[in-house]
Image (tube, rainbow, N blue to C red):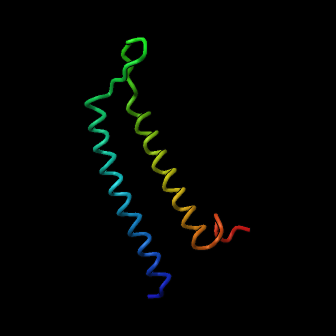
Amino acid sequence: MSPLSVFLAVIVSITAILVVYLTKQFQNENSNYLTSNLMKNTNSKVKTIEKEKVVAETLNGRFAMLGLIAAIGAYLTTGQIIPGFV
Protein backbone atom coordinates (compact mmCIF):
# COMPACT_ATOMS: atom_id res chain seq x y z
CA MET A 1 0.00 0.00 0.00
CA SER A 2 1.17 3.48 -0.76
CA PRO A 3 1.54 6.03 2.04
CA LEU A 4 -1.38 8.01 0.63
CA SER A 5 -3.65 4.96 0.81
CA VAL A 6 -2.64 4.36 4.42
CA PHE A 7 -3.25 8.02 5.27
CA LEU A 8 -6.70 7.98 3.67
CA ALA A 9 -7.58 4.74 5.46
CA VAL A 10 -6.58 6.30 8.79
CA ILE A 11 -8.65 9.43 8.09
CA VAL A 12 -11.70 7.37 7.11
CA SER A 13 -11.32 5.22 10.22
CA ILE A 14 -11.04 8.23 12.51
CA THR A 15 -14.11 9.78 10.88
CA ALA A 16 -16.12 6.58 11.32
CA ILE A 17 -15.14 6.33 14.99
CA LEU A 18 -16.06 9.98 15.50
CA VAL A 19 -19.47 9.49 13.89
CA VAL A 20 -20.20 6.47 16.09
CA TYR A 21 -19.12 8.35 19.20
CA LEU A 22 -21.21 11.42 18.35
CA THR A 23 -24.23 9.26 17.58
CA LYS A 24 -24.04 7.63 21.00
CA GLN A 25 -23.61 11.01 22.70
CA PHE A 26 -26.55 12.35 20.73
CA GLN A 27 -28.75 9.44 21.85
CA ASN A 28 -27.80 10.13 25.46
CA GLU A 29 -28.68 13.80 25.07
CA ASN A 30 -32.04 12.86 23.58
CA SER A 31 -32.85 10.65 26.55
CA ASN A 32 -31.88 13.51 28.89
CA TYR A 33 -34.01 15.90 26.87
CA LEU A 34 -37.08 13.68 27.11
CA THR A 35 -36.94 13.82 30.90
CA SER A 36 -36.62 17.62 31.07
CA ASN A 37 -38.12 19.26 28.00
CA LEU A 38 -39.76 22.24 29.68
CA MET A 39 -38.28 25.69 29.79
CA LYS A 40 -39.51 28.46 32.07
CA ASN A 41 -40.35 31.78 30.46
CA THR A 42 -39.94 35.13 32.25
CA ASN A 43 -43.74 35.47 32.42
CA SER A 44 -43.84 32.22 34.44
CA LYS A 45 -45.64 30.51 31.58
CA VAL A 46 -44.47 27.05 30.63
CA LYS A 47 -43.00 26.86 27.15
CA THR A 48 -42.20 23.55 25.51
CA ILE A 49 -39.34 23.26 23.08
CA GLU A 50 -39.92 21.00 20.13
CA LYS A 51 -37.62 18.00 20.10
CA GLU A 52 -36.88 18.34 16.38
CA LYS A 53 -35.54 21.86 16.84
CA VAL A 54 -33.19 20.79 19.62
CA VAL A 55 -31.96 17.88 17.52
CA ALA A 56 -31.44 20.08 14.44
CA GLU A 57 -29.53 22.76 16.33
CA THR A 58 -27.31 20.21 18.05
CA LEU A 59 -26.42 18.49 14.77
CA ASN A 60 -25.87 21.83 13.05
CA GLY A 61 -23.41 22.91 15.73
CA ARG A 62 -21.50 19.64 15.64
CA PHE A 63 -21.18 19.62 11.87
CA ALA A 64 -20.09 23.25 11.91
CA MET A 65 -17.30 22.37 14.34
CA LEU A 66 -16.26 19.41 12.17
CA GLY A 67 -16.12 21.73 9.16
CA LEU A 68 -14.01 24.23 11.07
CA ILE A 69 -11.57 21.51 12.13
CA ALA A 70 -11.41 20.23 8.53
CA ALA A 71 -10.67 23.74 7.24
CA ILE A 72 -7.91 24.24 9.80
CA GLY A 73 -6.44 20.82 8.94
CA ALA A 74 -6.52 21.60 5.21
CA TYR A 75 -4.84 24.95 5.79
CA LEU A 76 -2.13 23.46 8.00
CA THR A 77 -1.31 20.64 5.57
CA THR A 78 -1.62 22.44 2.22
CA GLY A 79 -1.62 26.16 2.97
CA GLN A 80 -4.99 26.54 1.25
CA ILE A 81 -8.51 26.48 2.66
CA ILE A 82 -9.77 24.51 -0.35
CA PRO A 83 -6.84 22.44 -1.67
CA GLY A 84 -6.45 22.63 -5.45
CA PHE A 85 -8.81 25.58 -5.81
CA VAL A 86 -7.06 28.65 -7.18
Q: Quadrant of residue 21?
A: bottom left
Examine the rendered structure and indicate whether residue 56 appears above or below residue 73.
Answer: above
Q: Residue 5: x percent and y percent? A: 47, 81
> Residue 69 vs residue 49: left or right?
right
> Could you say where residue 43 lies in the image, as x and y percent from the top left?
42, 11
Q: How many marks?
A: 0
Quarter of the C terminus within the rendering: bottom right
Left-right relation of 16 to 85: left
Quadrant of the image occupied by residue 11: bottom left
Quadrant for the N terminus, please.
Answer: bottom left
Q: Residue at x 28, y 44 (%)?
A: 28
Say which residue appears at 51% left-offset and 60% top-offset. Answer: 69
**Residue 50, percent across and down?**
40, 28
Front residue of 32 and 6 = 32
Residue 44, given in percent of the width and then of the height, sits at 38, 12
Looking at the image, is 22 positioned above or below residue 28? below
